[in-house]
Image: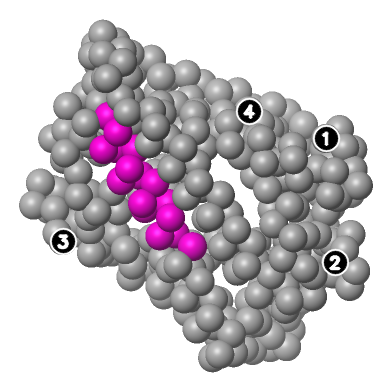
Amino acid sequence: MSQKEEKQSSLWIGTAVSLACIALILWLVDPQEVLEALRVAQYSYLALCAALMVLFLALRAVRWRILLDNQVSWSQTFHIQNIGYMLGMLLPFRLGDVARAVLIGNVPPLTIGRGASTMVVERLLDLLFFVVLLPFTVAGLPTVPENIRTAALVSGIIALFGIVVLVVAANQRPLVLRLSAAVLGRTPLRQPERITHQVDELLKGLNSLTQWGTGLRLLLWSVILWLPVLSAYYIVMRSVGLEVTPLTAAFITCVAAFSVAAPSSPGQIGVFHLAVTAALTEILGQPEGPAVSFAILYHTTQFLLFILIGLIALPSTGTTFQQTIQSARQWRQRNR
């Protein structure tokens, strides 16, 4: 199967999964209950939710700038990051991440590879936050089944071990690169040098985690920047009448964060809604109508906000929507 066919297959699978999730929600939940919950919801809370999301993005740009060794301004990282999120909501194949790497790589003295490697570190830091947070949340929620508690603990241990391995590898970069070159040289893979170069770029991005001062700052920012999101979940849940606590909101945020790993259409449509609805109703015993209405209101607010701030950010980069997409696609084509 060609790469084009693989992409098409991936897109169709993701779309099918999203549609199946939406169909399952409609089948299991009475639409009238959802409409009633939406009718009585306190929509004024969504303005505060949007403000907290903007704060999250502002803090996230600070962390990205630290990963880039403060070589670019905060406004540049903020706007380029927001363009990436906008494209991630609209386009498949994580093209938003590619666009972020290309746009930041066009800002001297950075490179596209450096930008891409820092986004990998971002995801590792986010993963670390949630795998540490999840066991604490399930421990404080008596309705969570024992098998989920065990899975949360095991996944946390595995993720922490994986991150430690990567940090050690970053500390021993020359050795890892020699081993990579030796192993890849004995395989039938084409262009092993390019793969080794990509490994090198990843390890360079992880270099910030090998320095105690910078690493602790990044960990601290990784906690701080997610606090607005936890607050936004709590506020929107309250807006639809769900009986929640900060611990409940933290648990649902973890569920939503891990749901992005599932294949879906752009923007996690359907997958997000089913994951948080199932967690609220089946695990926490919340009513179905308000649970689905929460998923709809939160996701819609995020979706529209990310598109809006992405469009606002485009002029700051001196490019257009179409040019950004074209540049990202061309870079991906060259680096297959």
Q: SS at mark 4?
A: helix
Nearer the observer: mark 4 or 1; the answer is: 1
Residue 224 shows in this picture: yes
From the viewer's perspective, is residue 109 above or below residue 326? below
Between disc 2 and disc 3, whose residue precedes?
Answer: 2
Magenta stretch: includes residue 204:
no
Principal SS element in the magenta part? Answer: helix
Q: CA distance from mark 2 to mark 3?
A: 43 Å
Left or right position of 161 against 294: right
Which is nearer the eye, 48 or 335?
48
* Residue bounds of the magenta highlight: 225-240
Q: Say left or right for 183 vs 270.
A: right
Q: Secondary structure at mark 3?
A: helix
Q: Percent from the top left, x then y, of residue 153?
A: 25, 64
Gap between marks 4 and 3, in whole Å? 37 Å
Q: Is residue 211 left or right of residue 105?
A: left
> Which residue, given by chain and number where applicable, does mark 4 sit on?
11
Mark 1 element type: helix
- Pointer 2 residue: 111
The residue lying furthest to the front in this view is: 44
Looking at numbered disc 2 in the image, what kind of residue is underneath it?
Answer: Thr
Q: Position of residue 184 (x, y in %)?
A: 74, 69
